[in-house]
Image: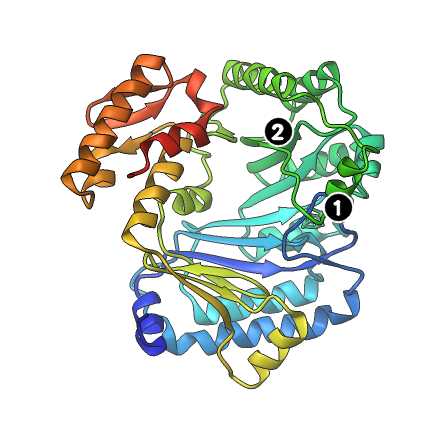
Amino acid sequence: MAPRKHRLSYYFKNLEHLYVHWPFCPYKCNFCDFVAIASHESFMQQYHESLCKEIQDFKDLYDAQAPLKTLYIGGGTPSTYPLPLILDMFAILKETISFDESTEVTLEVNPGTVEQGALEVWKSIGINRLSIGVQSLKDTVLQGLNRHQTKIDVINLLQKTEPLFENVSVDFIVGLPGVSAEEWKAMILQAMTWPIKHISVYFLMVHEKTPLYFKIKQKSVVLPPDDEIVDLYYWTVDVLEQHGFHRYELSNFAKKGFESKHNTAYWERKGYKGFGLGACSFNGQYRFQNNKNLRNYFQAVLDKNDLIHDVEEITPAQISMEKIMLGLRQAQGINIADVIQDFSLPQQQHFKERADWLEAKGFVRQEAGRLFLTPQGFILENEVAVNLFPE
Ligand code: SF4
């Protein structure tokens, strides 16, 4: 492993993508395994101060040659970042890091958490994209997930965002317990009437040790059957395409020109720096994660200690696998020559044979040196990827 100093100085050259984490949530959804903490509002001020210090301390390590391409404020629930504090944090960011009106600046927003005047403040500090966590429009389902928001909260928020923000995205989860196929279709059709430019449709992930996981284990919650979820996904893809939202990634659909630049950078394995509790950074060779424990994070910032808690060196084999996995998820597919360039000759041969076999089965298509999933293959992305991995 490279010495720490070397890693840090290598890492921060030509930084184009930045992530800032706000971990506080007003509640904890029972499917969530993010670095998110509920009922800790009394720590917001201290967290803000630590976050700002972490950003300021970064100045010496930052070698900007051009403004950032993307800045993403995620969480947690960043729409609960108190307005005077987010103003302060942005002032410090602007002193430290170069970004301008060409930078895509996204804020994650949860309906029901937006205080009066917040949208105007967010716009004034340069936020130009909102990512709204809708997940479902069925109030009883949201309550069952311990997500304290309602359909009315969503509608009210969208009415307020429309005159101020052009670039608005909404997230939905397909496969939530308690949502029938007809209800799902009605939600998506309703979303097609909204002033949005981007929609993400995620499959429900049941993470171990979450309340939802235990409820499913105890059979007090029953998930819809897999084939119903797959049918709904395909139905959704068709409806979104008919309304001008093209699928540019397995779960992401956008009007032309409104694809998420930040997420695309992740999928293309571009480097990024993350600030805040548990925030991840990546330099193409190493993945770093900041301390995930709030008290330890505070102490490390205070002591000017290394905030990085975990470092993972990405091996050449992992790089190839990541390129396959992430490339397959995107409509642009994978660049075959790029993926197999570090393979041995037998591995290259294996890849080509598997690609031809998958194409004969109708799961992938090969064209002009790229390999793409077919509509049939999209839903089997993991299995297709595993078939293409080197032996
Ligand atoms: S609002 Fe988001 S981050 Fe917070 S608990 Fe719910 S899913 Fe997790």
Disc 1 is placed on an element classified as loop
In this picture, is 316 found above or below 168?
below
Q: Quadrant of the C terminus?
A: top left
Which of the 4 image quarters holds residue 152? top right
First in sequence, mark 1 or 2: give its number: 1
Residue count near mark 2 (Cα–Cα under 10 Å), binned few <14, some 14–19, many ≥20 = some
Residue that appears at 25% across and 28% down: 370
Q: Hey, what amino acid is under mark 1?
A: Cys
Q: Is residue 296 left or right of residue 288?
A: right
Q: Residues within 10 Å of mark 1 (few under 14, many from 20)?
A: many
The amino acid sitting under disc 2 is Pro
Q: Which mark is residue 29?
A: 1
Tags 1 and 2 touching, CB below 8 Å = no
Q: Quadrant of residue 235?
A: top right
Q: The residue tagged with tag 2: helix, strand or loop?
A: loop
Depth-wise, is mark 1 or mark 2 nearer the camera? Answer: 1
Inspect this view and state whether residue 226 appears: yes
Which residue: 30% across, 17% down?
359
29 and 58: which one is in front?
29
**Residue 35 position in % (x across, y down):** 63, 57
The residue where tag 2 is placed is 195
Furthest residue to the bottom?
A: 303
Q: CA distance from mark 1 to mark 2?
A: 26 Å
- Image side of residue 268 versus residue 163, left or right: left
Say if 225 sits above or below 152 in the image: above
Q: Which mark is residue 102?
A: none
Residue 162, position as x, y percentages in the image: 64, 35
Q: Is mark 1 within 8 Å of ligand 1?
A: yes
